[in-house]
Image (spheres, grey):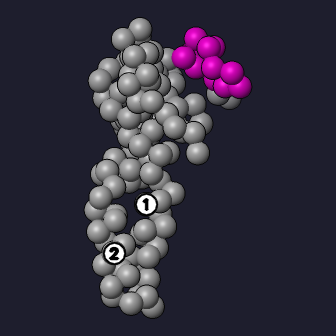
Amino acid sequence: MQQVNVDQQVMHYRSGKWTDWRMVKDVKRRLCLVEHGAERMRLKAIKKNDLLPVEIREVGFKMMDALPRDSSIIRIRNRCAFTSRPRGIVTRWRLSRIAWRHLADYNQLSGVQRAIW
C-alpha cells in the first residue's frame, strides 16, 4: 500500500484546489480510510465473530479503538466537486443537483442532453 502524505495534499488547498475547509476535511478522511480501511475491516470481522474466544475478541476491540475515527467509512460524505455542497449529489458526475443543472443548461456536461418532447 502506498503511503500518502496528508500535509502534501493539504498544500494544494492553498493553491485553490478545494472549494472550502469542509472539502479539505473530507479529503483527509478519505486518505485515512485508504491507509487504515483494510485493517479496520479485518478487526471488525474479528470483533463480530461470536465463534472466537472472548479474549481474542477483546483484543480486536482494543486494536480497533486504537485506530483513528476517520478511518471509518461512515465518516465519508459525498460532496459536490464545485461547491462542496453535501446534499443532492448526482453520483455519476460528483456534482450537486444545482451545479449539475447549471452546467447541463449551458451544454458543459459530456453526454447530457436537455429533455425535449
Residue 70 sits above or below residue 60 on the image:
above
The disc at residue 40 is 1
Quadrant where the N terminus sits is top right
Quadrant position of residue 29: top left
Residues rendered magenta in the picture: 103-114
Identify residue type, mark 1.
Arg
User: Going 39% across and 90% down the picture, which residue do you hit?
Assistant: 53
Which element type, helix, strand or loop, lies under badge 2?
helix
Please state the horizontal and vertical placement of residue 79, each as a whole percent of the image: 41, 33
Question: Badge 2, how many Cα within 10 Å: few under 14, some, many 20+?
Answer: some
Quadrant where the C terminus sits is top right
Q: In this view of the protein, which residue sits in the foreground, 95 or 56? A: 56
User: Going 30% across and 51% down the picture, which residue do you hit?
Assistant: 69
Which element type, helix, strand or loop, lies under badge 1?
helix
User: Going 41% across and 10% down the picture, which residue do you hit?
Assistant: 16
Identify residue type, mark 2.
Val
Q: Does the magenta-highlighted stretch encompass residue 40?
A: no
Q: In this view of the protein, which residue sits in the foreground, 40 or 59? A: 59
Please state the horizontal and vertical placement of residue 108, each as a whole percent of the image: 62, 14
Closer mark to the observer between disc 2 and disc 1: 2
Can residue 113 be seen here? no
> Does the magenta stretch mainly form a helix, a strand or a loop?
loop
Residue 90 sits above or below residue 64 on the image:
above
Q: Does the magenta-highlighted stretch encompass residue 108?
A: yes
Please state the horizontal and vertical placement of residue 89, each as a whole percent of the image: 46, 36
